Amino acid sequence: MARIVMKFGGTSVADLDRIRNVAIRVKREVDAGHEVAVVVSAMAGVTNRLVGWCQELSPLYDAREYDAVVATGEQVTAGLLAIALQTIGVDARSWQGWQIPVRTDGQHGTARIAAIEGAELLRRMKIGQIPVMAGFQGLAPDNRITTLGRGGSDTSAVALAASLQADRCDIYTDVDGVYTTDPRIVPRARKLPRITYEEMLELASVGAKVLQTRSVELAMKERVRVQVLSSFSDAPGTLVVDEDEIVEQEIVAGIAYTRDDAKVTVRRVPDKPGIAAAIFGPLAKAGVNVDMIVQNVSADGTTDMTFTCGKSELPRALSVLDNAGKIIGYAEIATDKDVAKISVVGVGMRSHAGVAGTMFQALAERGINIQVISTSEIKVSVLIAAEYTELAVRALHTAYGLDA
Amino acid sequence: MARIVMKFGGTSVADLDRIRNVAIRVKREVDAGHEVAVVVSAMAGVTNRLVGWCQELSPLYDAREYDAVVATGEQVTAGLLAIALQTIGVDARSWQGWQIPVRTDGQHGTARIAAIEGAELLRRMKIGQIPVMAGFQGLAPDNRITTLGRGGSDTSAVALAASLQADRCDIYTDVDGVYTTDPRIVPRARKLPRITYEEMLELASVGAKVLQTRSVELAMKERVRVQVLSSFSDAPGTLVVDEDEIVEQEIVAGIAYTRDDAKVTVRRVPDKPGIAAAIFGPLAKAGVNVDMIVQNVSADGTTDMTFTCGKSELPRALSVLDNAGKIIGYAEIATDKDVAKISVVGVGMRSHAGVAGTMFQALAERGINIQVISTSEIKVSVLIAAEYTELAVRALHTAYGLDA
């Protein structure tokens, strides 16, 4: 007997037939003797429609009203799934964020969960009633509805699992696990039976769209065992666990890519102390999320400063640099949106030398030029021309021995 | 300066353009110096879709889950209208039923409002913030969401007006007032500038679909002045008020009709004490709403008992009679669904004789046979063959001098 939180994403509850299918999956776990709580997303497409309405009424909509409108999507799914469960003989009831309550801060649109008061849910689970919680939402200190940001239902599920001290948090989605890379690019990509929190976190933050980054952070902090699996198949998924739960750790767990970044080069800035602060201070103040940064070796008293940020943030970044131009004193700004960031992730890097070298070698052999490099303890990322994305991913997948 | 509750129905908020239009109407009242609170329905079609989903999952759906699902429609509209108001410079915020709260009993699907705690809304209205309340919903004693039954947003609005001691409750809908009869049948029908609660109540309960019956009951009980008007025109509407506010009272205020009833005749039941109880007791127990009842004069120790009920309730009524057949002891059951109920309503009847006589005379002149008659203090209703509906309504409209 285990205690399990099951979370179903938008495609898994896209219509009534799929909701019935989800009910059957839940019943299966209940019949196996487990204590089960369920978290649901909005039916696929619903959130986009609601968001679209808010934006159409006002691009500068009140985030508190946006939250009130958008949170209804999950509320509908929770009620419908409760009915579907009851119909097949499973005692169930829906819970909206404010009813539990899921307490959050007051940061509307991107609220963070402070606490989930799970005692009443647990009491009901023990007498066989399945709570179906509307994901993505909570209650602000001033009694208004908050939402957690796109993909927030993953975080709802992990937070609920932590609150209930669940043995596992199963995230049902439209892929059946975490792969060594995108199978659409590398057909020989392998599904990982296990992956560490750290690796999953790096993969989520560099483009793998399986789990919301914040949900992985929370799972790591609260030590919630997360399983990613498909609601459309019975194949075993990928377990996201603590490093010491993985006996045979591979050096590289996976390869991720993203084409969502743009490169900005500030040319011929004076090479003197404080120049980085003069550039990146105003950017940070304006909320531009700067990722990779590289500073060229100085020549004749000036240097080039290159960084990347999200493509959608590029106009804002350029406007900031334009305003700060007098203080910084640069010759020109060059931008490039045709770039891709390729990342190699694995906790094995900590104890193995030469991982970055293998990457550079493999790319060099295919004639792929590296524009920017950044590294973390368990990750190496490079920026390359976007047209080489697939070639680079395939080359690296082979170079690290990940091919099935 | 007046305090006004403005309520907008589903067709008035059917899309974003109409929601913007509603915002402009609200702003106009605000600019005129009034204290305004708003109540909204779900966007046209939304409630039907949500109800359909529940029914499709289970014809015997859990009414508590149905309420959680269906109440989201009004929540969306409230948030969107708040955004639309802010966009044109009006301070506004949405309120869901549980936030105010609108306290109801626990009768899910058809809950009754116990109290609306309006103090906080009033405080905000006094500093210029417009509350936009999601109609149709409330909070049960066990902290679950309730809904008030179809058309319940009218009742929400009247209850809010009572709680806020508003000077008026304006119900914006797709017709611009209450007419002497259906203008689609009688083009010369006149819009009534004023009508009494009692008349409105009788008209609403016999087929005029302008206001939910319960909302009129509540308005009468709490003495809330209700105005019915169109959100698509600037024409003045109809005021529903106390009798003493109407100086020149006409004898007949309006003529209503409904084709939603069926006639059931139980033939040759023994004419003895207790027989009516034997028939109508089980019907009431089964929740069948019996309207008109007529018992024939006895012949050879038996009599015929005729009654009407909603067409949708007919199968249930017949099943009840079938089960109770042995106890009642009847020869046969005859049913007729091709009937219409025509009602003449007016508080002037109390002091004027001959109103029913005028009705019977006018129908007789057109060769229309009356099948059943029922009367109240301010109403005369007759059941006729459905094919004569329009002819009867037109004849009566002329006979009572209501033609424009």
Image (spheres, coloured by chain):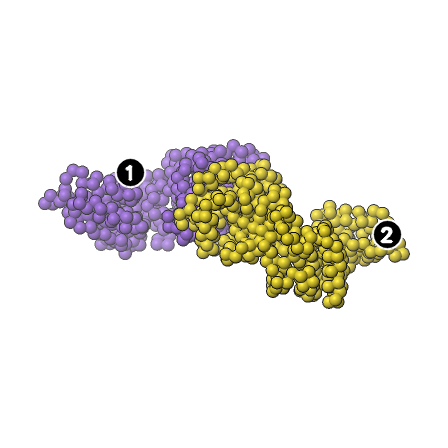
Chain colours: A purple, B yellow
Q: Does residue B258 appear to the left or right of A343 in the view shown?
A: right
In the foreground, B22 or B164: B164
For this rendering, which residue is in front, B2 or B92?
A: B2
Q: Which residue is mark 2?
A: B271
Viewed as shown, does residue A291 lie left or right of A164?
left
Give coordinates of residue B402: x percent, y percent.
65, 60
Please identify the residue farthest to the front as the structure is shown: B247
Residue furthest to the right in view is B300
Q: Quadrant of residue B159?
A: top right
Nearer the observer, B192 or A160: B192
Q: Secondary structure at mark 2?
A: loop
Question: How far apart, in angstroms, are the residues tagged by discs 1 and 2?
Answer: 96 Å
To the question of a shared chain for discs 1 and 2, the answer is no
The tag on residue B400 is none
Number of numbered discs: 2
Callout 2: residue from which chain? B
Q: Which labelled disc corresponds to residue A377?
A: 1
Horizontal and vertical percent for residue A124?
56, 35
Secondary element type, mark 1: loop
Q: Residue at 53% across / 35% down in the picture? A: A121
Mark 1 vs 2: CB contact within 8 A:
no
Q: Position of residue A264 (x, y in %)?
A: 23, 49
Question: Residue B325: x, y in percent?
Answer: 80, 52
**Mark 2 Cα-neighbour bin, 10 Å: few <14, some 14–19, many ≥20:** some
Name which residue lies at 52% across and 46% down. B5
Q: Residue furthest left?
A: A300
Given the image, on which type of amino acid does mark 2 rest? Asp
> Which chain does tag 1 point to?
A
Figure check: B210 above or below A107: below
Point 50% across, 34% down: residue: A118
For residue A29, say whether it is visible.
no
- Position of A195 compared to B375: left or right? left
